[in-house]
Image: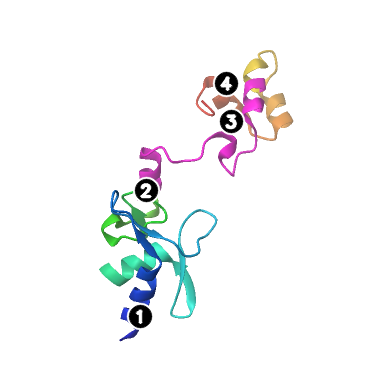
Amino acid sequence: MNQMESITDRLMAKADVDERTGCWNWTGGSNGHGYGRAWANGRMVSAHRLSFELHCGQIPDGLHVLHSCDNRACINPAHLFLGTHAENIADRNAKGRQARGSANGRAKITEADVIAIRAATGVVQRELATQYGICRQKISDIRAGKRWS
């Protein structure tokens, strides 16, 4: 058995095939975002990227491996395809999977803050921006319903 067969066998030993969806769900370790992690050639790698490389070939520099099934644990190469970072973000947004509101790890304010900002009709944007630690344009966008809508 060559090294590639050994890696493929180890990868498949930790895959649970879902007959309904066709997903090969990774049952090994994962990162904090639900993507599988596996050891290969002495280093820890993403299980879905490893599966893609084993079944489809090398991943060109700068490309990501995306899931057509939207299942982060899936390592089925038939459910994986290559795309740029911008294509990955566009795919996420088109499918409504982006974190919104305070669920977004980069959020500086809460839903309650947004309600208070919208209710503060007599307060100037500059003052609200200082109070909440965000820029004046964000205050304007929140009030106009362009953000946190």
Residue 79 drawn at (x, y percent): 29, 55
Callout 2 touching callout 4 (CB < 8 Å): no
Give the amino acid type for the residue marked by disc 4 in the picture.
Arg
Marks 2 and 4, Cα distance to the nearest angstrom? Answer: 33 Å
Mark yes or no: residue 61 visible: no
Q: Which amino acid does label 1 sit on?
A: Ser
Amino acid at dot 2? Asp
Would residue 91 be counted in the magenta stretch?
yes
Quarter of the figure with residue 2? bottom left
Q: Earlier in the sequence, mark 3 or mark 4?
A: 3
Residue under the point 34% across and 75% down? 9
Residue lying at the far top of the rendered structure: 122
Q: Give the residue drawn at x 37%, y 60%.
A: 16
SS of the residue under disc 1: helix
SS for tag 4?
Answer: helix
- Vertical position of residue 99 compared to residue 113: above or below: below
Of the image marks 2 and 3, the number of the one nearer the N terminus: 2
Q: Nearer the viewer, residue 30 or 97?
A: 30
Question: Hey, which quadrant is residue 76 in on the image?
Answer: bottom left
Secondary element under disc 2, as helix, strand or loop, is loop
| Dot 2 or dot 4, earlier in sequence | 2
The residue where tag 2 is placed is 70
Nearer to me, 3 or 49: 3
Q: Which of marks 2 and 1 is nearer the N terminus?
A: 1
Question: Alpha carbon of mark 4 to alpha carbon of mark 1: how far?
Answer: 58 Å
Q: Name the residue under label 3.
A: 138
The residue under label 4 is 143
Q: Pick whichever, 122 or 35, lies toward us.
A: 35
| Vertical side of 8 occupied by 93: above or below | above
Residue 5 visible in rendering: yes
Q: Determine which residue is flagged by label 1.
A: 6
Bounds of the magenta segment: 87-116
